[in-house]
Image (cartoon, rainbow, N blue to C red):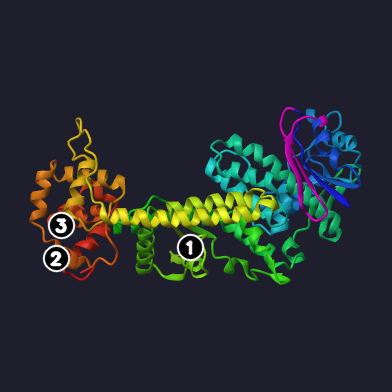
Amino acid sequence: MTTYLGIDLAWGEKNPTGIAVLDDSCRLLRLSAVTTDAAIEATVAAYADGRVIAGIDSPLVVTNPTGSRPAEQALSADFRKFHAGTHPSNTGKPEFAHGTRGARVAERLGLVVHETALEVYPHAALVALFDLDGILTYKDKRGRDLPHLRSELLRLMGLVESLVTTDQTWANLRAAVEGATRKSDLRVAEDQVDAVVCAYVAWYADRHPDRVTAYGDEETGIIVTPSLGLPVATTRHDPAREAVRSYAEQHPDLVAAASAAVAHLASVLDEAGINYLTIEGRAKSVASFAEKATRTAAGGPLYPDPLHDIGDQLGIRVITYVRDDVEAVAALLAEQLPVLDDRDFGELTASQGRFGYASRHLQVEIEGRVVQVQLRTVLQHAWAEFEHDIRYKGTVPAEHASEFDRRFTLAAGLLELADQEFSAIRERLRGAAPTETAGDDPRIAPGELAAFLAGQYADAGWSRTDHYAWISGLLLELGITTLVELAELLRATDEAAIGARMDYRYPPGAVRRLDDALLSAFGERYIGLHGNAHRRDLLATRLDRLSGAAPGA
C-alpha cells in the first residue's frame, strides 16, 4: 500500500502549511493546517508506514544565485499563456540562502528529493488536469473581491471532488468557504485545498508516469506536473466522475438559480395570497451530488446519466401550517408552472395501511431548470427531520430498532391527527385577533386589520402575519387610516363581480381579497403606490382581468 502526502508548504514556520493524505484509492485520510516542521512531522507520522510519496508545493533544490531555475523557465514557457508561470527562486532570496525548507521537511519525513519527494505546482497541474483556459483565480490579489475569491475556490473544490473521495473534514471546510465573510477565512481553507491537489499530483505521477512532464534536472531542481494535452478525463472513462466534474463547474450558477427560484416561488405564493411558514431553497452540494452519482443497484449505476437522472439538483421546501395549504400550493404550482412529476408520499404511506413519512414532492420547471419542490406542513416537517436525524445520522442500537419503528409510527399517527384538527380549527374559527396599541403609527394596526378582514371575508383563510402590516402601509398611502373608512370603501365594491373576474382557483387569503378590492377601487393609482413598486406588472395584469380586458390589451 502506498500513501500519498500533499504539502502546501509556507515559506516560514509562522504561516500555515496545508497537509493532506490520500490512500492508493484516492481517498482523503487526513486534512489539516499546521505551522512548524515538527508539527508537519507529527501530523503525517501515523501514515509513515509503508511506501510514501509526497507532492510538495515549494522549491526543493535551489542553486542559482539569481534569476529563475531552469525548471521554472521551462515550465513557464509552456504554461505562461495560461497565466500559470512560476515565481523565480534563487539563493539571493533569504528563504533559499541556506538551502530550502522543502528539502529539510523531506529529509525529516524520510523522503528522497526527486524520488519520493516531488516538487509540484498546483496552478499548472490544474490547468493540465482539467484542460483549463487559464488558472483559477482563487488567490487574493488586487481587484479580486470576496465573492469572486469564494466562487473560484468553490469551483476548485468541486474539481478536486471529481478526483478525490472526500470526507467530513472536507465537507466542513467547504461549508466554511461557503459561509466565509472575510478573505482571511478563505486563506485558511486555500492552503488545505492546495495540499489535496499536491497529494493528487503525487498519486497521478506515481500511477501515470507516462502522463507527466518533469521540468528541469536533478542538480538545479525538478518540477513534476501532469502533461499538457492529456487531461485527466481521458484516463477515466467514468460517467459519474465526469458528471461530478461538470456539476462542480456549474455549481456557482446553480446556487444563483436556487436563490432566483425561491424568489419566484415566493412571489407566486404571495400573489396568490396563500399562507405559508417558510420557503427555503438550495443547490445540491457537489459532495452530495458526487455521493448520489456513484450509487449502485443490482450491480450497475443507479443513475447512468447523473446530470440528467438526479432530479433534486435544485430543491425548494415550502412549509405550510395545515394540510389544506399543501394542497393549495400544489394546485397553484400546477396552474402556474410545468409540472414534470407529482408524488404524495403521505397518500402512498396511507395506501399501504400505515403511518409514516408524509410529504408532497413536485418536480417543476422554472426558467428552463428542473426544480424539486417539497411541500410539508410544519408538523410533517418536524417528524421527518427528527426521524432522519435519529435513524440516519445517529446510531440506533439493533436491540431498539423495532421499538423505535413503533414509536415513530405512533408519533406519525398522532401528528396526522393533529394536522386534521388544526385544519378543522381554521375552518371553524374566524375570531378576532388581539387589539394592538398603535402609538404614533397612523396605520391601522395589523392585528385590528386581521380581525376586521376575518369578518369581512368569512370564507377566506388567514394570510401571513407580515402581509397584514404590509397592506396596512398601502392603506396609509391611500389615506385610509381607520376601519370605518375601510368599511365604507369596501361597501362600494362588488365582491361577487371581483370574484367572478379573478376566477379564484385556489383559496385566497384575506389580504389577497382586500388587495383585489383596492385594485378594483383605485386602479392605476393603486398600482403606482410606492409599496407596490416591486409588483406593478403583476398588478397591471390583474387590473386587465378586473376590467374585462384581454391581458396586454
Q: Nearer the viewer, residue 502 or 519?
A: 502
Residue 346, x across and y down, in percent: 47, 64
Q: Which span is picked out in magenta? A: 14-38
Q: Which mark sits nearer the N-terminus, 1 or 2? A: 1
Q: In the rendering, which numbered label is found on residue 523? A: 3
To which residue does mark 2 refer?
497
Relative to 550, is 324 on the left or the right?
Answer: right
Q: SS of the residue at dot 2?
A: helix
| Quadrant in which residue 107 is drawn | top right
**Residue 216 seen in this snapshot:** yes
Tell me the distance, in whole angstroms, between the alpha carbons under discs 2 and 3. Answer: 15 Å
Kind of residue sitting beneath label 2: Ala
Relative to 360, is 237 on the left or the right?
Answer: right
Closer to the camera: disc 2 or disc 3? Answer: 2
Kind of residue sitting beneath label 1: Val
To which residue does mark 1 refer?
371
Residue 186, x across and y down, in percent: 61, 39
The quarter of the rendered structure image containing the C terminus is bottom left
Q: In the rendering, which numbered label is found on residue 501? A: none
Q: Pointer 1 and pointer 2: residues touching (CB < 8 Å)?
A: no
